[in-house]
Image (spheres, coloured by chain):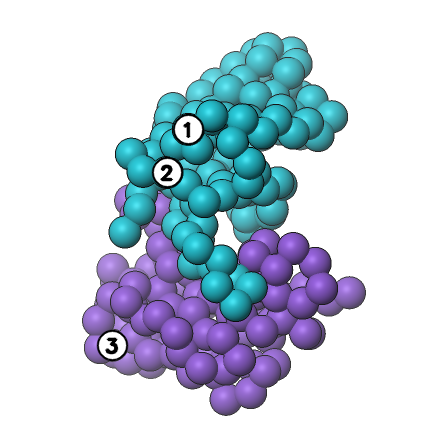
Chain colours: A purple, B cyan
């Protein structure tokens, strides 16, 4: 079975540019999460969706960040404009389905560097 | 919201030595999950503990949930180089509609001298 698929795996961009990260959750999972990981702050939950509807976006740092889930198999996290402090690994994860419903399966991450 | 404190932050051991990481909370936890993240990798689910005093084993790994459900530990017996990585505990709130918002501890980074 395919896991959570994220793209791009690595991105280097200049400050002020728009960044779009993409995620395809595991088929059949009805929860999708976006996490950010940095050395200083660890793993932070940014936002999560249930059945494509945003449930909790209290972790989104500021208005420069936005996330959408137009259908059950696709989500985006957008940063506009990007800043150097946004440099981090962004993980998409999903849960649900037939197994332990609250186990979270992570994608391999998108490594973002803003210069 | 609830927070889990994980100690130690770093641990370096000789291969073959044991390793333990602890996860503590000031409030009662409904459940706790453990994840492992290899260097350059992504967190991978190891186990979930739900019951007070629960102990689960996976080969050389032993997971415990405290009687008061306020702490948990992961113990690795006779570490191997494949155990290198960061171990996270994650506390979950109430399970509503089948999923929960996990809050991760800061993790314990384990390095091993072969």
Residue B92 percent across, percent down from the top left = 45, 50
Looking at the rendering, which quadrant does residue B8 occupy?
A: top left
Q: Earlier in the sequence, mark 1 or mark 2?
A: 2
Q: Residues within 10 Å of mark 3 (few under 14, many from 20)?
A: few
Residue drawn at x 40%, y 78% as measured from the top left: A54
In this rendering, is residue B49 above or below B67? below
Q: Nearer the viewer, mark 2 or mark 3?
A: 2
Q: Which residue is mark 2?
A: B28
Looking at the rendering, which quadrant does residue A17 occupy?
A: bottom left
Residue B94 percent across, percent down from the top left = 44, 55
Residues at marks 1 and 3 touching, judged by CB atoms closer than 8 Å: no
Q: Which residue is mark 1?
A: B68
| Same-subunit check for callouts 2 and 3 | no
A20 relative position to B36: left or right: left
B111 relative position to B106: left or right: right
Q: CA distance from mark 1 to mark 2?
A: 7 Å
Q: Nearer the viewer, residue B7 or A23?
A: B7
Residue drawn at x 36%, y 46% as measured from the top left: A42
Q: Residues within 10 Å of mark 1 (few under 14, many from 20)?
A: few
The answer to whether residue B101 of the structure is visible from this angle is: yes
Q: Residue reaching furthest right?
A: A1
Q: Which residue is mark 3?
A: A64
| Same-subunit check for callouts 1 and 2 | yes
Tell me which chain the residue with mark 3 is part of: A
Tell me the SS state at disc 3.
loop
Tell me which chain the residue with mark 1 is part of: B
Q: Nearer the viewer, mark 1 or mark 3?
A: 1
Tell me the SS state at disc 2.
loop
Q: CA distance from mark 2 to mark 3?
A: 35 Å
Residue B3 percent across, percent down from the top left = 31, 43
Q: Which mark is residue B37?
A: none
Q: Quadrant of the N terminus of chain A?
A: bottom right
């Amino acid at each position: 079975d395919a896991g959570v698929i994220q793209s791009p795996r690595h991105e280097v961009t200049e400050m002020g540019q728009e960044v779009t990260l993409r995620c395809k959750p595991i088929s059949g999972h009805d929860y999708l999460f976006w996490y950010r990981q940095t050395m200083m702050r660890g793993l932070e939950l940014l936002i999560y969706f249930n059945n494509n509807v945003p449930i909790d976006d209290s972790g989104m740092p500021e208005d420069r960040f936005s996330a959408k889930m137009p259908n059950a198999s696709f989500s985006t996290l957008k940063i506009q404009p990007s800043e150097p402090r946004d440099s981090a690994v962004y993980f998409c994860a999903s849960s649900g389905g037939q197994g332990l419903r609250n186990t979270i399966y992570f994608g391999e991450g998108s490594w973002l560097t803003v210069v | 919201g609830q927070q889990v404190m994980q100690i130690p932050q770093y641990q370096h051991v000789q291969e073959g030595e044991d390793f333990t990481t602890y996860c503590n909370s000031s409030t009662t936890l409904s459940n706790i999950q453990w994840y492992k993240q290899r260097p350059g990798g992504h967190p991978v689910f190891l186990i979930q503990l739900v019951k007070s005093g629960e102990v689960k084993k996976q080969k050389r790994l032993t997971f415990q949930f405290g009687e008061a459900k306020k702490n948990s530990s992961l113990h690795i017996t006779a570490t191997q180089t494949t155990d290198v990585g960061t171990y996270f505990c994650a506390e979950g709130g109430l399970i509503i509609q089948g999923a929960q918002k996990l809050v991760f501890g800061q993790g314990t980074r384990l390095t091993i001298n072969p």
